[in-house]
Amino acid sequence: MRRPSVRDDLALHPGYHSPQVDVDVRLNTNEAPESPPDGFRAALADELAAIDWHRYPDRDAAALRSAIAEHHGVEPGQVFVANGSNEVLQTLCLTYGGPGRTVATFEPTYALHSHIPKITNTAVASGERTDDFAIDLDEVRRVTAEHDPTITFLCSPNNPTGMIETEETIRAVADLAPGLLVVDEAYGQFAPWSALELVTPDDPIVVTRTYSKTWSMAAGRLGYLVGPAWLVDELSEVVLPYHLDAFKQAAGRVALRFEAEMQARVATLVEERGRVSAALAGMDVTVWPSASNFILFRPDTVSGDIVWDRLVEHSVLVRNCASWPRLDGCLRLTLGNADENDRFLAALTDVLDPANLESA
Ligand code: PMP
C-alpha cells in the first residue's frame, strides 16, 4: 500500500510548537497563573449533571452566545464561538481566505496569523513594523494596495511584543484594509482600551477573544469573536456542525458568573506587570512596554539563548524568541503570581551577574 503524500503546499511549512520543559516555574505560554476561582468547579459539576449526553449539543450554542453577548453589551447574533480563538481565526480563513486570496499581517506578531492562512491555502502578505515594533501606516498602505487582502490581522496587545495599538491606528488600518479587519484581543482584558468599541452591525471589523488567559480556562479550548451578525451567519455555515460540545458550552457560561473575581485577578496581574517591568528596567536588558500579561525583553550583555538556558538551570521557563525573525535575542516572560515573578527576577539577576557571565 502506498502512503498518501501531504498536500504539496503544506509540506513546505513547519508546524507551530511551544517546547515544554519540566521546571518549577512555567512562565512561557501566557496562561493565567491560577485555576478558576473557588466555586467554578462545583457550579460546573451541577451544569454537567444536567447534560443530555446521548443528544448532540445545541448547535447554535445559544445560551453561551447570549451570556457572552450580555457580557459585552452586544446582540447574541454578533457572537461566534469556537474551540479556542485559534479555531475562530481558522474559520475566518476558511470563509474569507483560500486559494487566490491573501491575508495581511504586520510582523512580528502572533505566529498563527500566518500559520493558519498557510494551512488553509491562503497567501500571506507580511508587512513590517517599525524597528520599535509599532504599526507603520505607510507600510499598511503599501501592503493593502499591493496585495488587496481579504483579511487583515492586527493583534492588540500584540503577541509577542505586548504593545497595544491606539484607537487612531486601528481606525486608520480599518480605513485602509480593503476586506475584513480582524483585531485579535486574546489579551484584551489587560489593556486600557478595546477595539470592541469599533464593532458595528455593518462594518467588516471583528474582535476575537479567548477564555484561555483571563478566564483561566486554557484547558477548555474556548474562544469567540464579536462582529456584525451577517459575518457570524457566514462563519456558521462553514464551521463543522456541532463543533462546540455541551461540556464547553456549559463551562463558558459558568465562567462568566465569576467576572468580579476575574477582574480582580486581572488587576493583580497588571500590578505585577508594573512591578516586574520596573525591576527589569533596572537590569541589563531592553524592555518593551506591555499592555498584556507578558513582557518582551532582550538581554543587553549576553545572548538570549544563553540567558534562556541559564534560567532553565534555575528551573524557570520563559519563551525563547531569540531566533525568531525580527526578535533577535528576545525572551518573553509570562507574568505569574508574585512568588513566581520573584523567582524569575532572582534567577535573572543571578544569570546576568557579570561574575556568573564570565563562563558564558
Ligand atoms: N491569539 C493570540 C494573540 C494568542 O497569543 C493566542 C494564544 N497563544 C491565541 C490567539 C489562541 O488562543 P486560544 O487558546 O483561544 O486558541
Image (tube, grey):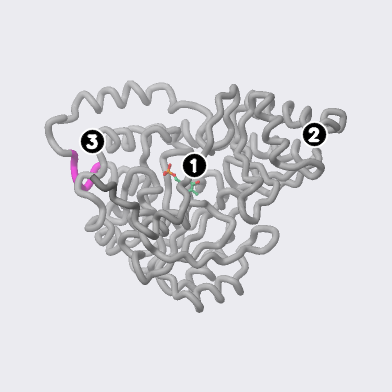
Q: Assess whether mark 3 and mark 2 are in contact (beta carbons under 8 angstroms).
A: no
Sequence-first disc among 2 and 3: 3
Sequence-first disc among 1 and 3: 1
Sequence-first disc among 1 and 2: 1
Residue 227 highlighted magenta (yes or no): no
The residue type indicated by label 2 comes to Ala
Distance Cα–Cα, label 1 vs label 2? 27 Å
Residue 168 place in picture, x, y as percent: 57, 66
Mark number displayed over residue 17? 1
Mark number displayed over residue 246? 3
Quadrant of the rendered image containing residue 356: top right
- In the image, 252 versus 9, the foreground residue is 9
Asked if the residue at label 1 sits under 8 Å from ligand 1, the reply is no
Chief secondary structure of the magenta portion? loop
- In the image, 207 versus 323, the foreground residue is 323
Distance Cα–Cα, label 1 vs label 3? 29 Å
What range is drawn magenta here? 57-63
Report the residue marked by disc 2.
360
Q: Assess whether mark 3 and mark 1 are in contact (beta carbons under 8 angstroms).
A: no
Mark number displayed over residue 338? none
As helix, strand or loop, the secondary structure at mark 2 comes to loop
Front label number (2 vs 3): 2
The crowding category of the residue bearing disc 2, from other C-alpha atoms within 10 Å (few below 14, some 14 to 19, many at least 20), is few
- Name the residue furthest front: 1
- In the image, 61 versus 197, the foreground residue is 61
The residue type indicated by label 1 comes to His
* Residue for point 28% across, 38% down: 249
As helix, strand or loop, the secondary structure at mark 1 comes to loop
As helix, strand or loop, the secondary structure at mark 3 comes to helix
The crowding category of the residue bearing disc 1, from other C-alpha atoms within 10 Å (few below 14, some 14 to 19, many at least 20), is few
